[in-house]
Image (cartoon, rainbow, N blue to C red):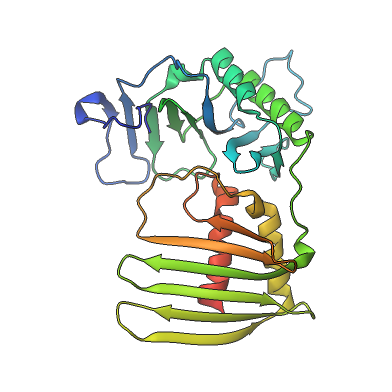
Amino acid sequence: MFGKNSDEKIDGKDLKRYFESGPPVCGGTDSYRDQKAPKEIVSKDMTLFEAGTSLFTLVLPPDKDSSSRLWYISAYAAYADKGSFVYLSKSTECRGPAKSSWALVKRDVLPDLVRLVDEADLARSNGCHSTTHGLPEDFGGRVFIKYASGESISFSNNQSPIIAYDTCVRMADLFESFMGEERVALKDLSGLKEIRFLEERDNGGFTKAILAFNADGTGTNRKSMRFDGPTVYESEKPVDAETMSKIKSVIERCGMLAWSGLPDSGFPKISKKSMSFVFDDGETFTAEDGKELPYAIGNGFFAIELEVTTKH
């Protein structure tokens, strides 16, 4: 993070602090810059692209078409096992809902994004971060881009737009073109037989759950848990058809069948979690927690975990 190579550590001497509020207080601002973050990226081998910003505080000049202007955009692309996973969320209405879509496309789309980043000179803001506590979500923006060389671009500001409007329009057009490309075929969820959840904790404890899809649309959830002792607790509960339908909707909305091979977030883990989707023909797709994904789709894992481990 902060534009460093993977084998480098950030020294406190590298950070130039402009404002620091101490303990987070509403309205307090923390602002700093990594003085060693590169302003030019040598590598052309991008592995992850994630960029998003709100644009509603911008006033467009008269020559811009404001009838279909962008108010918000979030875009993501990364390599998965079977192709390029791409995601786009954008709003063309002031304070209106964002429309989102994802795809697993066969073509390698990351070189297109290398050109976008270079031509927009996004690296010029590398290492600059500012947070004002108490502001609503999606008020500003964040950019995080990784390269195979270990180089990265990272900057954020939750107070105002951080990407030029014309660049955002180009980004939206580019990702919409990705959505229309040849896709990797994925299983139809009508054949989903069961979801198997597994959490293995460092202390030897575990949580296992098998959520079976019944023929009438309902489900049966079988769960076993062990904490730090030898006792294993088991339970079996029915799940109503409405909840089962919502779970399928989460899988589809978040593209979870296409997660295999996506990059890890790099955050420390206190346990290892995985979720396997088993189909009638025996084919299985596995998604793991802790992937570097936009929150809007990354939270799909937790939503299903909550259903199988806590609610039922």
- Res 161 visible: no
Q: Nearer the viewer, residue 169 or 217?
A: 217
Residue drawn at the location 35% of the way across and 51% of the way down: 268
Q: Quadrant of residue 311?
A: bottom right
Above/below status of 302 relative to 228? above
Q: Nearer the viewer, residue 292 or 149?
A: 149
Above/below status of 220 relative to 246? below
Above/below status of 100 relative to 193? above
Q: Nearer the viewer, residue 217 or 60?
A: 217
The C terminus appears in which quarter of the rendering?
bottom right
Residue 71, position as x, y percentages in the image: 66, 33
The N terminus appears in which quarter of the rendering?
top left
Q: Specify whether 107 is left or right of 47.
A: right
Question: Furthest residue to the left?
Answer: 13
Q: Specify whether 37 is left or right of 305.
A: left
Q: Specify whether 238 is left or right of 53.
A: right
Residue 115, position as x, y percentages in the image: 60, 17
- Res 154 visible: yes
Question: Furthest residue to the front?
Answer: 282
Residue drawn at the location 78% of the way across and 36% of the way down: 182
Marks counted in the figure total 0
Residue 300, position as x, y percentages in the image: 59, 57
Q: Quadrant of residue 281?
A: bottom right
Residue 98, position as x, y percentages in the image: 69, 43
Above/below status of 116 relative to 10? above
